[in-house]
Image: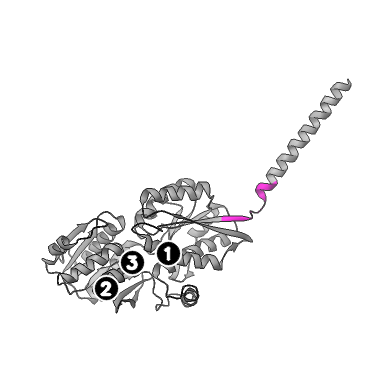
Amino acid sequence: MQKRYLFRLMMMFVVIAMLASACQSTAGTNDKPTEIVIGVYEPMTGQQAAGGQLTMQGVNLAYEQHKEVLGTSIRLVLVDNRSDKAESATAMTRLIEQEKAIAVIGSYGSSNSMAGGEVSEKAGIPVMGCSPTNPLVTSGKKFYFRACFIDPFQGRVMAKYAVETLKATKVAIIQDVAQDYSVGLAAFFKQSWKELTGSEDGIVAEAAYQSGDQDFTAQLGSVLAANPDTIYAPGYFGDAALLVKQARELGFTGPIMGSDAWEAPELLSIAGDAANGILISTHYHPDAELSPASKPFVADFKAKYNENPSAFAALGYDAYMLVYSAIERAGSFDPTAIRDAIAATKDYPGVTGTISINETGDAIKDAVILTVENGEFKYLSTVKP
């Protein structure tokens, strides 16, 4: 009898201990975390490294100014996607599975963003793209958003500028067929040209190249034979610098138009004087006060880096702040709640303009057109959507 009593007493203590442990475990899961992780996957190395590095200037500035949200410390974790699609997927996987990021920022390069987006979508982790402009980045995605405008708008901006401002009647298109970004922009420019002029007859020549090509004389020789008024060559800055330089060496004196990915110091240093007079569509310029946040940002950026911010730095800043604002508005660290708050963003005063997120996760905002004078990007005009 006494043994039975002792056995029951022992079992009671075991049950009490188990219940206490369970209560402690449950309490631990409900406690506010001491730290959250916001991940970043940008190209720090590889062909697109300059764009990623410029972007990180803005991200880092925003992080320095906002290291805590909802009373909890933020840890910013950067993983280099090496300008590569496969590495982008790997970087996203690491940020989600190993670093436990509740939201991710990136990436420069639409192809990189598309690769990372497949991973984040399956995991249900919200991502804020800084500058990936191809529509496919957010197409069919519930968790991928962007701080930038998209290529249909950018392509139309440049087609409209060519027709209405340059008064061009003949244009040649040269595209990088290895990059979704370049192919998409060329297609949207062509579509807009047809809508604006009533036909595609004015597109007198088209040529293609592959990322990393060094010699563009064959493509340029082909399109220049058609005697175009202007050349539209959307692509990345490294290839664009060589293309512009070689076009001038072959005697083309007309306007050469590019896209937002042309905006990099490397283009100016490689192309040299040949860059003077080029025209690009982009997201921001320090001389264009696109919202009340633009001017203070320029002052803060100059204080930190002793230089003017690029469009990519400004977009990096906006991307971080859009995520930060969403966490505040959600009042939660739950990725789905953050995703819902991002999707509900309306009239956010970003440094690159007033930003509203539409039903496809894209930013509705202004674009600016820049030229190059004396080796510097100069603001020309603002174009509204």
Q: Nearer the viewer, mark 1 or mark 2?
A: 2
> Which residue is at the far left?
225
CA–CA distance between discs 1 and 3?
Answer: 13 Å
Determine the residue positioned at 12% across, 69% down: 227
Say left or right for 383 vs 24.
Answer: left
Residue 169 lies left or right of residue 60; in this view the side is left
Judged from the image, the secondary structure of the residue bearing numbered disc 3 is helix
Per the rendering, the mark at residue 272 is: 2
In the displayed structure, 315 sits above or below 102; it is below
Q: Which segment is the magenta one?
A: 27-36
| Residue pictured at 65% horizontal, 47% vertical | 29
Q: Nearer the viewer, residue 269 or 335?
A: 269
Q: Residues within 10 Å of mark 2 (few under 14, many from 20)?
A: some
Q: Position of residue 81 (x, y in %)?
A: 41, 53
- The residue carrying mark 1 is 55
From the viewer's perspective, tell me whether residue 151 is left or right of residue 223: right
* Front residue (pair 251, 350): 251
> Which mark, by number, is residue 260?
3
Q: Position of residue 108 (x, y in %)?
A: 39, 59
Name the image quarter holding residue 369.
bottom left
| Mark 1 or mark 2, earlier in chain | 1
**Amino acid on which the number 3 mark rests in the picture:** Asp
Residue 368 in sight in this render: yes
Locate the N terminus by quadrant.
top right
